[in-house]
Image (cartoon, helix red, strand yellow):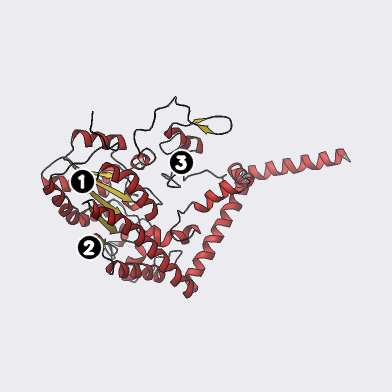
Amino acid sequence: MSKTILSVSLVVVVSLIVAEVVARFIFGLAPLEMQNPYQPVFALAERDQSSPSTDIAAGASGPGGYGYEHGTFGYYYTGRTPLPRSSTALADFLFDHRLSRYSAEKIDAIACAQPRSLGVFVLGASVAQGHSARSKEATWHALLEGRLRQALGRDDVYLFNGAMGGYLSLQDKLAYHMAVAPRQARVVLFLNSWNDLLLPAYSATRPGDPFVLGVRFEQTFSDGFLFWLAKHSGIVNTLVQNEAKSAVQTYARRLAHDDGFFNRYADKVTDIYLQNMSDVLTDCQMHGRFCLVAIPPTRPLAALDIGRPAGEIVPDRRVAALFELLMKKIDASPFRAQFADLTHLFDAPDLIEHFTDSVHIDEAGQKILADRLFEPMLNGLRTVEELHSTWMPSDGKSCR
């Protein structure tokens, strides 16, 4: 009997190994690789589609970046690595993404060397980062910085990009209070809204929640065995991904076909977005900051206007209804003057071609976006310039 059990077990193990080899090398199935690193405050950091988890752990937003060393059973701070520079330490990674041109350390150095310089802090998600540009110099924020310098006749105008792909207004609010306000920023530009309105449906999360929250729950509250299997087996990972896709499709179908559910969803996502941005704009008002919230262009809205279907997970008519409700609420808001509607910036047959997907734009589109933001940001900087005010490094102290 024992030999039979051993033989059967051996056959099962060998069969599983062979099945996994076939799945990986014949069908191209890959095990789970974490591309959205965990971040202790913001839930996720810079999305990385190429680096293995071990490299991400050593990156700016990983435990290694915060000075934690890996022991046998966890990560520990032992004092062998530098202490945090300031209260912004857990948010400085925001300026370390691949399209950012100024690190947190560089920003603080500029604040010390040029306290009367004109710095614009940019927050938002991947559109705000300049996603789809092939280089930092081709991003809309780099192009806008150049135009503003030329118009103002000074070379100390800077656009500091602290945006992060996948972020919602909740995380933008955290970024504002943790990375921007401590530096006494005078000008802040937000480009956001799409993720708040649509990302819940694309990730099967509640309105207002970071899109990786379900994954974080699984990592924390399950026994971890299935998660471990998915990281080591292409077959198991495929099953996990299929379940996630099924949940997203169910969510999207409800939004598409259930009018009652859609109306409740639309009301909540727009309310939560405006609550978060109103909190930020209230703080801007209290501290005399020039803050502008730009609602970026989207392909579904452009497609509807020119009579071309965009083919999104959520039907174009629903996307249009979400933005229509949002703009209606913005118009009724006491902060309506601090919002700029860019949603129809690419509403033409030739312009819609600048979209690389639902919201991201190519390098020619980056220039169009920079041109559209030029006038409002120029007016904002001129207002600040007249005040002759200063800003400071992240620790709030005078520079040594």
Q: Nearer the viewer, mark 3 or mark 2?
A: 2
Q: Is residue 74 above or below residue 205?
A: above
Q: Earlier in the sequence, mark 1 or mark 2?
A: 1
Residue at numbered disc 1: 145
The amino acid beneath tag 3 is: Ser
Identify which residue, 81 or 130, lies in the foreground: 81
The amino acid beneath tag 2 is: Ala
| Residue 163 appears in the picture as rendered | no
Query: Separation of disc 3 and disc 2 at Cα?
Result: 41 Å
Tell me the quarter of the image containing the N terminus.
Answer: top right
Say which mark, if any, is on residue 50: 3
The amino acid beneath tag 1 is: Glu
Q: Nearer the viewer, mark 1 or mark 3?
A: 1
| Residue 302 appears in the picture as rendered | yes
Residue at numbered disc 2: 337
Secondary element at image label 1: helix
Q: Earlier in the sequence, mark 1 or mark 3?
A: 3
Residue at 37% x, 48% y: name it. Answer: 164
Q: How many marks?
A: 3
Residue at 44% x, 31% y: name it. Answer: 67
Q: Earlier in the sequence, mark 3 or mark 2?
A: 3
